[in-house]
Amino acid sequence: MARSAALAFTLLFSGCAAPAQGPAAARPAELTGLARYLPLEDGTVFAYETSTEPASERGLLVLEVRRTTPGTAELVVAGRGRRLTLTTDAVAHAGGGFLLREPLAVGAEWHGDFGHVRVTRVGLSVSVPAGTFADCVETVEELATREGDKRTTTAFCPGVGIALRETSVEQGDERQSERIALKSFGKKFDAGAANPAPNAR
């Protein structure tokens, strides 16, 4: 089966950059609305543990957030970016559909990257290698076709963003699943800023 279970917002790569180090740190408390559940702060690097079944493959996905303008952001993996458009009540894929949008209430629905999205749970507790996060929002995106069914479940957590994401694809008697779980996150280390040149003023 082709890797049609690839993540809706990026591609899987292994060891593409150095992961953020140390435990997950809280984001500013003043974040509200969608920004609370999807901060998208420039220079933030997320490291995710990845697993696929039935191949039983394990790996690491490293994603960096780049804010090109106040209304746009890119999710970058191995030099390849996925652009998002930001407003106060929605985060949209540049190619169409939404990653997240208001209201963040059970039953809310919208068109996503590949299928129909609905909010299935709020106030959810999610445990991943980076820690346990409370008050998370869960969305499920689904698409059913004659070729097969695809389903992606995502947990967005306050001050973090995507903490857990699971995608499954069924084609006939075959089923493939892919999971990413947050391992660490933090600001990208800038060696130049930490060690300025001797003549720098």
Image (spheres, rainbow, N blue to C red):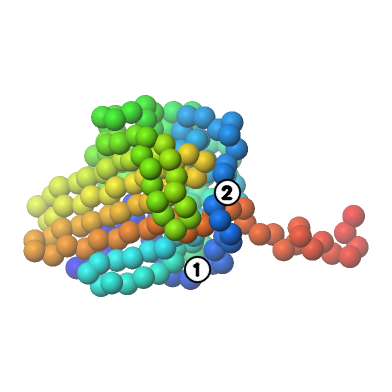
Of 184 and 85, nearer the camera is 184
Amino acid on which disc 2 is placed: Ala
Image coords of residue 9 (percent x, y): 38, 51
Amino acid on which disc 1 is placed: Cys
Within 10 Å of the Cα at label 2, are there few (<14), some (14-19), or many (20+) other Cα atoms?
some
Instruction: Tell me if residue 132 comes above or below residue 59 in the rendering.
Output: above
At horizontal 56% and vertical 67% (from top left) the residue drawn is 18
* Residue 174: quarter of image: bottom left
Image coords of residue 152 (percent x, y): 28, 49
Mark 1 to mark 2 CA distance (whole Å) = 22 Å
* Residue 96: quarter of image: top left
From the viewer's perspective, is the residue at label 1 or at label 2 nearer? 2
Instruction: Tell me if residue 8 comes above or below residue 62 in the rendering.
Output: above
Return the residue at label 2. 25
At horizontal 50% and vertical 49% (from top left) the residue drawn is 74
At horizontal 57% and vertical 44% (from top left) the residue drawn is 26
Within 10 Å of the Cα at label 1, are there few (<14), some (14-19), or many (20+) other Cα atoms?
some
Which image quarter is the C terminus in?
Answer: bottom right
